[in-house]
Image: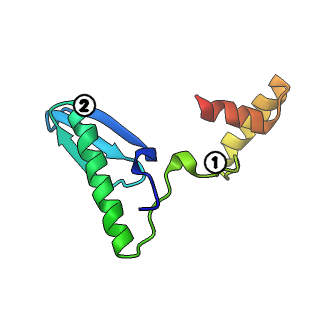
Amino acid sequence: MTLETDKYTYRVTWSEEDEEFIALCAEFPSLSWLADSTENALKGIRSVVNECVEDMCQSGENIPKPFSIRNYSGKFMVRVPPEVHRHLVTEAAESGVSLNRIASAKLAH
């Protein structure tokens, strides 16, 4: 196996509907695991992801690269309504900073 599955993005949360903890993997959004504890849920999803990656390797499929080791440029385009654009430009000008700085600060919150 070329990828280490422990580098994937795992999350465990309570599912009120299932009355159990549910574990997810962001790189494999169709997979999940329910368990009675956070530890068992994490152990279960990691096992399922491991099996999935092994199957994908055997069948020659492209395996998702973990978010944690991907390279990001720091650039992406966001489309907003013209009135939002105008409001942000005005706010940036009044604050004495660039539009990019205003948008970045708002996205960070």
Work out whether residue 57 or residue 94 is closer to the camera in this orientation and state it. Answer: 57
**What colouring does the structure picture have?**
rainbow
Name the kind of residue labelled 2 in the image.
Thr
Work out whether residue 5 or residue 20 is closer to the camera in this orientation and state it. Answer: 5
Residue 16 lies left or right of residue 73; in this view the side is left
At a point 68% along the width and 42% down the height, the residue shown is: 83
At a point 16% along the width and 34% down the height, the residue shown is: 20
Work out whether residue 16 or residue 99 is closer to the camera in this orientation and state it. Answer: 16
At a point 41% along the width and 45% down the height, the residue shown is: 6
* Residue positioned most to the bottom: 59
Position of residue 98 relative to residue 48, above or below, is above
Checking the image for residue 40, the label placed there is none
Residue 47 seen from this side: yes
Residue position marked by numbered label 2 in the rendering:
38
Residue 37 lies left or right of residue 31; in this view the side is left
Work out whether residue 100 or residue 37 is closer to the camera in this orientation and state it. Answer: 37
Residue 30 seen from this side: no
Residue 107 in percent (x, y) is at: 61, 35
Checking the image for residue 80, the label placed there is 1
Residue 102 in percent (x, y) is at: 73, 32
Residue 14 in percent (x, y) is at: 24, 31
